[in-house]
Image: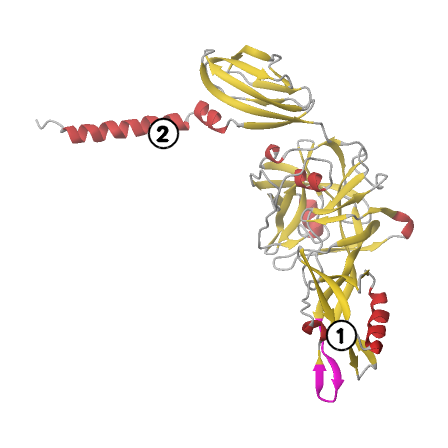
Amino acid sequence: MKQPTSTSRRRRTGCLLVLILCLIAASAPFRNFASFPQQIRLFVGRPVSLHLALPVHASGTLDPQVAVVNGRTGRDFPVNLKDPLSIDPLRTGTAELKLRLFGMIPFKTVKLQVVPDLKVIPGGQTIGVRVRAAGIMVVGHHRVRTGPDTRVSPGEEARLKPGDLIVSFDGRPINDVHLVGDIVREAGEAGREIELLVQRNKERFATRIRPAYDEEDKTWRLGLYIRDSAAGVGTLTFYSPEHGVYGALGHVITDMDTHVPIEVGSGEIVQTNVTSIAKSQSGEPGEKRAHFLDEGRTLGSVERNTAFGIFGRMDRLPSHALHVKPVPVAFAEEVKKGPAELLTVVGGQKVERFDIEIVHVARQTTPATKGLVIRVTDPDLLRRTGGIVQGMSGSPILQDGKLVGAVTHVFVNDPTSGYGCFIEWMLQDAGIMLKAEDAVSDPVSVAA
């Protein structure tokens, strides 16, 4: 009989080792250990439970004493890793939980970050938004007829582009288009240039523009299409009575022509009444149709317009709220795939609760838009709206009794689905949670 060679024995041994490693990697204890976090964020007073399911004993050290583990803290307290670890945060601060097998072998170090507890009232009310820019927005060029065969655009000659924000005219801050006409006429009649301070993205520069006399309309012009304000409909996401602030929309407000984010100078949100719904269908996102109620229904101010929505002051809870008491909020890492609910208005002013499914969760450690993919599963909402419609952006998403996010965009080719953002990033921009850095975006969707 032919004896196996040393090469074949090594090959068989290698295959056996690979099989053993695969079995270990597939085991529940190994998976639990691999998924065991290196850092855990907690709210004061909200315990969390972690399960390693390892059939071994260890000792734990937790210092300083911002939390207790299984009712213990300090140095070298016993831990049975087969049972869940219950971590109860006591006060704000940071600490390290160090686990040692048999009290000697370093096994795992977990950083704990405990922050003040935070609760807000979920919204869902449809709101009207009016904002005035922090200057004059350039939305296009036109040519002025200065002679029988002569047309010029002073705006183009001054290097202005659609999306630019004119911050001041001759050193005077202006954010009302009705005031621009007099400035242009006076400069034109005097034969002088106007000095402009212009903001383009995050940069500012100075330029000069000379008005041209329009022979057709017999007036002085800059050769620019300009705008100073915008208005629209969205949904209130949350209200914090403790801080007197709100958040809404879940995405930035942009100019309708240039699609450039609006630099807000002032603004307000008002109560609205939804009169009808244009249902969504593949390729055609629907929309809420609503009218603004009287001026006495002003709800709050608009102070900031960010990648995650609009934010400002609010001194009372708007009417028709489903929740009148604050609910817990969730960190981004707490959100999971599975059932959730959405609060929104589809008729009149009544906030209703609808079933959705969170089908994807992007693991984000810094602010980024479109962290969730959601799908509407509620037959009633599908029947009435076709899924997600424009004007629904900002609708709060709740899971396991916690506010976890907000609707932001609808998928154009599948309006039953869309994107959401984590509530954590909105709370940061509202100024009531510690701020992180940066934001990114994703394609193939329309703002809801």
Rendered residue at 83%/67% (across/down): 180
From the viewer's perspective, tell me whether residue 348 is left or right of residue 407.
right
Whether 300 is drawn above or below 80: the answer is below
Residue 211 spot, x, y in % from top left: 77, 75
For badge 2, the amino acid type reads Cys
* Residue 213 vertical placement versus 26 (above, below): below
Describe the element under mark 2 as helix, strand or loop: helix
- State the residue position of label 2: 22
Q: Is residue 247 magenta?
A: no
Q: Is residue 254 above or below residue 397?
A: below
Q: Is residue 330 above or below residue 304?
A: above
* On-image quarter of the N terminus: top left
Task: Please give the range of residues in magenta.
Answer: 141-151
Residue 297 on image: x %, y %: 88, 48
Identify the image's colour scheme: rainbow, by chain, secondary structure or one colour.
secondary structure
Magenta segment's dominant SS is: strand
For image coordinates 81% across by 35% down, the residue present is: 241
**Which image quadrant is residue 178 in?**
bottom right
> Dot 1: what SS?
loop
Q: Which residue is mark 1?
A: 210
